[in-house]
Amino acid sequence: MNVSIVIPNYNGEKYIIDCIASVYHQIDHKPNIIVIDNHSTDTSVPLIKTHYPDITLIENSENVGFAAAVNQGIRATNARYVILFNNDAFARDGFVEALVACMEADPEIFSAGAKMLRHSEPGIIDTAGDELTILGWAYKTGDGQPSDRYERQRRIFSACAGAAIYRRQVFEEIGYFDERFFAYLEDVDIGFRANLHGYKNVFCPAAEVEHIGSATSGSKYNDFKVRISARNNIWMLAKNLPLALKVLNALFILVGIMIKAAFFVLKGYGRSYLKGTSEGIKGLPSFDSGKTRATVRRALRIEWMLLLSTVRYVGSKMIPRR
């Protein structure tokens, strides 16, 4: 299989060895497992060197963030496909083979996301692909739902980069992960760009992983994560929405920001959310905002995807979790 696996790591001593072990025997050429260490201060690096001296380990002198780290890994390989894999994820048998088979079936596919299951509840979905609504919200499909409800391959807005495969040559056309994002929503951003260029992102249910989640950031919500996500959300929409869709969806996006602000105020992170949103707006001049080029057909396709994602999001809130 012409594939490499890139694992970004930061202080992942609790999980990194088991993470690598889960994919080690699924890759024929061991140096094609590439760990990018973001200047960990724990025992991650010596553990990797001791247990897996035959894989590729790249050590950064500082924490450059998720986006920059995975870009290093992508550029370090000439493989046709690159799998990005979180250090707190654990692949089930057949994971790599299933992802490669998905890509081989359709040359128009840019990325394929795995079925990510909760490590604490292996029968429950963590994510079955990322979607984006007209409110500007990105969300995880299937979060909290039984795994057997997600057995069909389908097109999604973007793949979650915690366990996904990418067609490497397409990065040269659409660009790599945006390193200004540092972390969070960089996978939705690149999935958006793939859609704009006419490529597909799909969900590959045969590729299964168990995922702990938030192992690096420490929790589902914290000041850093809320602030950076809010900032990146503004940038992702400004960068990628064609001008006509910006105008069409402006009111919905504003409503979405207001609802999220209220939500995070109730959670105790209102100041962080508003600070991140402000940083996002202030940073807009550094982006080629409003100049995204897309054919009318692709723009309409994206608007249709946003509408369907919104309907599915509302519907998911009405479906019993069990």
Image (cartoon, helix red, strand yellow):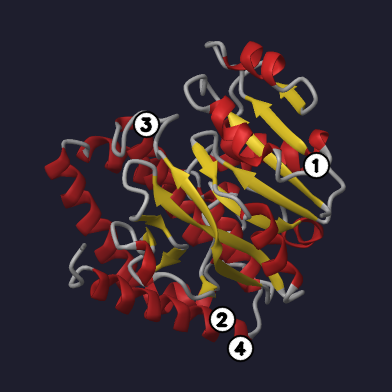
Residue beneath disc 2: 299
Residue beneath disc 3: 224
Horizontal relation, residue 319 to residue 70: left or right:
left
| SS under mark 2 | helix
Q: Residue at horizontal 56%, vertical 11%? A: 43
Q: Earlier in the sequence, mark 4 or mark 1?
A: 1
Residue beneath disc 4: 297
Q: Earlier in the sequence, mark 2 or mark 3?
A: 3
Q: Residue at horizontal 66%, vertical 56%? A: 165
Q: How many marks?
A: 4
| SS under mark 3 | helix
In the picture, the quarter occupied by the N terminus is: bottom right
Residue beneath disc 1: 75
Between 261 and 25, the one nearer to me in the picture: 25
- How far across and down, in percent of the image, does residue 184 sit? 47, 44
Q: CA distance from mark 1 to mark 3?
A: 28 Å
Q: CA distance from mark 2 to mark 3?
A: 33 Å
- Residue type, numbered disc 4: Arg
- Give me the disc on residue 63: none
